Amino acid sequence: MIIRNKKMFGLGSFFATTFLGVLLLIFSPVFSGKNGLQFADDSFNRLSKGSSYFIPKVSKSVEKVAGKQLKQEIRFDKAVDAQTAEKLFAAAGAKTEVKETALSVEGDFSAILRSTVADSDAMFKNEGKVVSEKYGMDEKKAMKSWRTALGNIEKNMKKEKLIEEAKVVSEVNKKAVEPAYNFYKIEGEKVADHAGMLSGLLVFYVAYTMWWGYSIFYLFDGLGLSMKKAKVKKEA
């Protein structure tokens, strides 16, 4: 390997060495026992949860189906899943019947969805014990069952051309059940309270990306490998 420009090559080597040093630090458990990626992931999860509380809005949407009756046959992959879902709907006051992998449900539509939203609210607030004691099962298992059941109901309603009702079910699932399940046991934080940290992480990400780019550029320049605009060949 022939070094044509020692100054540039040395600068590139310094940049590359310090880049790898910082990379090693990022993967070390120096952030309260976590590495940099885990710390950043946890931070963004807390901030995401802080801006994902849609329960009040979803509760208003549920009132759109007040006074309507829900009558559905929900099919599951396994019989045990149908039995699990039956407990949820029965607790919401619905009439239920399980036949192998199918669950027949009939009851007050809004009452069922209000029960779902109440469970989601408890889970979002990390009060999973409320849900587990209500159904006598693991709280995350219950929320997963709600998600599957509502997803199937939404599909059925779309086939039945019950578009408005399907939209309400979809909103409950996506803005109440799913955030509650995904952010369970995570403490939510407001973005405004951590604007400095977010700005710092963004600046670091951009600078760190450029850091590696310049190290490669200087190393290749030191070896005499560079990209230059080709000269336009003039015809005689």
Image (cartoon, grey):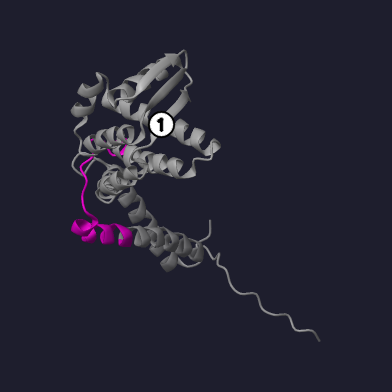
Question: In this view of the protein, which residue sits in the foreground, 125 or 204?
Answer: 125
Q: Main secondary structure of the magenta part?
A: helix
Task: Say which amino acid is labelled 1.
Answer: Leu
Nearer to the camera, 6 or 195: 195
Whether residue 91 sits left or right of residue 234 in the image: it is left
Instruction: Tell me where residue 221 appears, x and y as whole percent.
Output: 50, 66
- Say left or right for 137 vs 10: left
Residue at the spot of label 1? 70
Give above or below for 103 relative to 155: above
Residue located 39% across and 32% down the image:
69
Q: Quadrant of residue 90?
A: top left
In this rendering, position of residue 209 left or right of residue 119? right
Identified at 27% across, 42% down, the residue is 35
Residue found at the very far bottom of the displayed protein: 236
Stretch of the chain drawn in magenta: 181-203
Picture quadrant of residue 32: top left
Looking at the image, which is closer to me, 66 or 171? 66
